[in-house]
Amino acid sequence: MEKFEIVIILLFLLFASFYFLEFEKSIRTIFSNIFFFSLAFIASYSCFLNFKKFGKSLEGRVWFLLGAGTFFWGFGELIWAYYEVIKEVYPFPSPADIFYIVGYFPMILATFHYFSYVSFPLKTRKIYLAALVSLLYGLLSLFFVLFPIAISNLNLLEKSILMTYPILDVYLIFSGLLLVEAFRGGALSRVWFVISLAFLFTGVADTLFSYLDWNGLYKLGSPYDYIDFLWIAGYLCFIYASTYERIAVERIAKKIKRKK
């Protein structure tokens, strides 16, 4: 096992310890909020390191966009922490949602970049499979989350924000699945598999958040905040994928030099 993999596992266990061990609620709230925005910014920094390494190439531009997305999410986490820790109020809806939602668009552009500039040897069956999985996820979101929220008594702002997250996540999940198939067996297969897991974890967490918030179950100190593990797993996946690619490329470069 690589050193960075051990660090990622330890980070996850550290976060878990503040949920399963007996700490005061205030301490746990402060720790989890700091952990969230720190992890998001670390993920962003790691993605930007890949941009620095690959420059303005396709790979570099994709990592820049992924870094920008996680950077906006990090600001969202920072604003959420301010409201939850300093003001001690439940921060939804809040300015944090602006940064969360804006962060999706660089992510979407990153997948568009690959689809636009690379000819993928995708079989029709694989496209249908990815579309089917995304459609099933979208239908579940529609019947259990989107439609109930649309006809609820929530104000227009809350409805719009709660419905935006699951809709954007459907695209990320679909494009992530396609990219996994496109790179299957190649040097980037593990990278895009892990990024797709990040999209999946984030998507499921957002959908569950929309459902729980609509039902009034996700509040300050909510017992349902265990969905936080999904967001944390998503950020860790971005850190893993970007770090793994840097290490893999460096090792390939060293092998080439030895052969010469």
Image: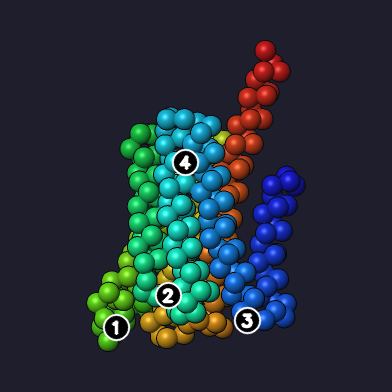
In this view, 157 is above or below 215: above
| Cα–Cα span, label 1 and label 3 | 29 Å
Labels 4 and 3: the sequence-earlier one:
3
Name the element at disc 3.
Answer: helix
Residue with the most extreme front position: 86
Name the element at disc 4.
Answer: helix
In this view, 56 is above or below 88: above
Residue 94's x, y, as percent? 37, 71
Asked whether 4 or 139 is in front, the reply is: 4
Residue holding disc 2: 91
Which residue occupies 71% across, 18% down?
258
Residue 210's x, y, as percent? 40, 75
| Cα–Cα span, label 2 and label 3 | 17 Å
- Check whether the beta carbons of the residues at disc 4 and disc 2 lie within 8 A of each other: no
Residue holding disc 4: 63
Q: Nearer the viewer, mark 4 or mark 2?
A: 2
Labels 1 and 3: the sequence-earlier one:
3
Which amino acid does the dot numbered 2 rest on?
Pro
Residue 87's x, y, as percent? 47, 77
